Amino acid sequence: MKKLAAVLAPLTLVLSACAATGTTGTAPSTATTSNSLAMMAVKVGVQATCVTELNNNTYWKTGSKLLTETQKSELQTEVCSCVGEKATTSVTATDLVVAAMDKTSQANLAAKIVTNTLNACVVETLKN
């Protein structure tokens, strides 16, 4: 959880900087940059949460029993990368703003994203 908070802290700074300067009506590139930074922060936080959740996942436990530690590590990286990629499509701007304001919401957002995408990514990765 502390890792997630540390990763999402820059998100808070980016969003509060925009609010403090009163630049809500500036060029679209500023908003795009802020959204990109926020999405990157969410992606990194979700990937960090993914490792813990993956080790508790039923599909992962069953599918990885016959794998070596190296194979498990490689697949774990692949699965969590998939979860991180899917995170960018499942987060709304409203979710980002709420997460920026409240540490509990940050943790809840990461858990929600991982829960919604982990099983699909495990199945997708194990099929390949």
Image (cartoon, rainbow, N blue to C red):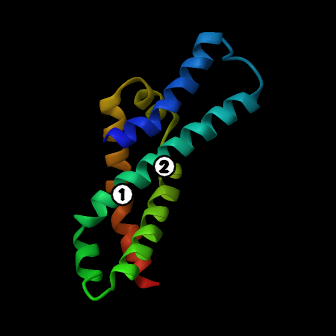
Q: Which mark is residue 85?
A: none
Q: Which residue is mark 1?
A: 50
Q: Quick check: 121 above or below 92?
A: below
Q: Which mark is residue 44?
A: 2
Q: What kind of residue is marked 2?
A: Val
> What amino acid is labelled 1 in the image?
Cys
Where residue 61 sits in the image (x, y, percent)?
23, 75
Q: At which x and y percent is residue 17?
A: 60, 18
Residue 83, x across and y down, in percent? 44, 60
Q: Residue at x 38, y 42 (%)?
A: 3
Residue 30 position, x and y percent, is 72, 28
Q: What whole-number distance in Å separates the C-alpha atoms at marks 1 and 2?
A: 10 Å
Q: Residue at x 24, y 84 (%)?
A: 65
Query: For this view, does 36 lie left or right of residue 128?
Result: right
Can see residue 124? Answer: no
Which residue lies at the image location 47% right of the left edge and 52% below the top edge? 87
Spot the residue most to the bottom: 66
Q: Which quadrant of the figure has residue 19?
A: top right
Q: Earlier in the sequence, mark 1 or mark 2?
A: 2
Check whether the beta carbons of the residues at disc 1 and disc 2 lie within 8 A of each other: no
Q: Visible in this render: residue 104?
A: yes
The quadrant where residue 80 appears: bottom left
